[in-house]
Image: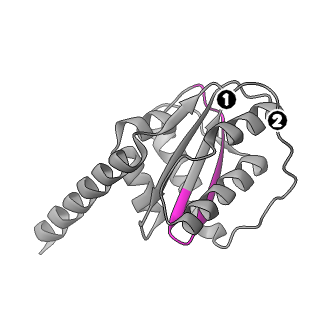
Amino acid sequence: MIVWRRRLRSICLVVFCLTLILATSGCSEETAPSGSPQNEDQPASLDHSLEEDIFGLTNEARIDGGLQPLTRESTMDALALQHSRNMETANSLSHDGFQARASEITGKLGAHTVGENVAVGYGTAQAFVDGWLGSEGHRNNIMNPSYRRTGVGYHEGYATQIFCD
């Protein structure tokens, strides 16, 4: 029974990773230009607990890998949550609007490099983080030693995690 569950979990992880790769063509990371559209709308999350758990699990992975933990940034939380809401509304996993999010982060927070992970359909924070850690591009974002800050947003099955230096 345990072997069957592990195999099923492995198959589900492989299917998700392939779907994610096909749907998003990898994770986003780019150096965003300076300048920032102003967005004062800071929506509240519907599921702070799952977001907190993703944040904590991300830092556990970084610490296990010999890296410094990330700090949580409210501006990035708001942008991540809004993107998760936008994906849910569009019923589509994407990095649409990443450049605008990155530009806002560079403008407001003085960051030079911004990365983003997105996922959909996992039931737990552990499953989201495990899925990202199982994908090279997403793992590279989580384990990037130059990143110091993060924001997490979850809405109706969609999760976004943004990183910056």
Per the image, label 2 sits on a secondary structure element best described as loop
> Would you say 59 lies left or right of 65 here?
right
Mark 1 nearby-residue class (10 Å; few <14, some 14–19, many ≥20): some
Q: Which residue is identified by label 2?
A: 36
As measured in the structure, the alpha-carbon distance from the residue carrying label 1 to the one carrying label 2 is 17 Å
Instruction: Give the residue displayed 79% in from the left and 28% down from the top.
Output: 110
User: With respect to residue 73, does 67 lie above or below?
Assistant: above
Q: Is residue 108 visible?
A: yes
Overall secondary structure of the magenta section: strand
Q: Is residue 14 magenta?
A: no
Mark 2 nearby-residue class (10 Å; few <14, some 14–19, many ≥20): some
Per the image, label 1 sits on a secondary structure element best described as loop
Q: Quadrant of residue 150?
A: top right
Residue 35 in percent (x, y) is at 82, 29
Q: Which residue is identified by label 1?
A: 165
Instruction: Give the residue displayed 57% in from the left and 53% down from the top.
Output: 160
Residue 64 in percent (x, y) is at 44, 39
Residue 161 in percent (x, y) is at 58, 49
> Would you say 41 lies left or right of 16 here?
right
> Would you say 122 lies left or right of 14 here?
right
User: With respect to residue 74, does 108 lie above or below?
Assistant: above
Instruction: Give the residue displayed 62% in from the left and 41% down from the top.
Output: 98
Q: Which residues are magenta?
A: 146-159
Single out the mark in the foreground, 1 or 2: 2
User: With respect to residue 33, does 51 lie above or below?
Assistant: below
Q: Quadrant of residue 12?
A: bottom left
Q: Quadrant of the N terminus?
A: bottom left
Q: Quadrant of the C terminus?
A: top right
Instruction: Give the residue displayed 52% in from the left and 63% down from the top.
Output: 158
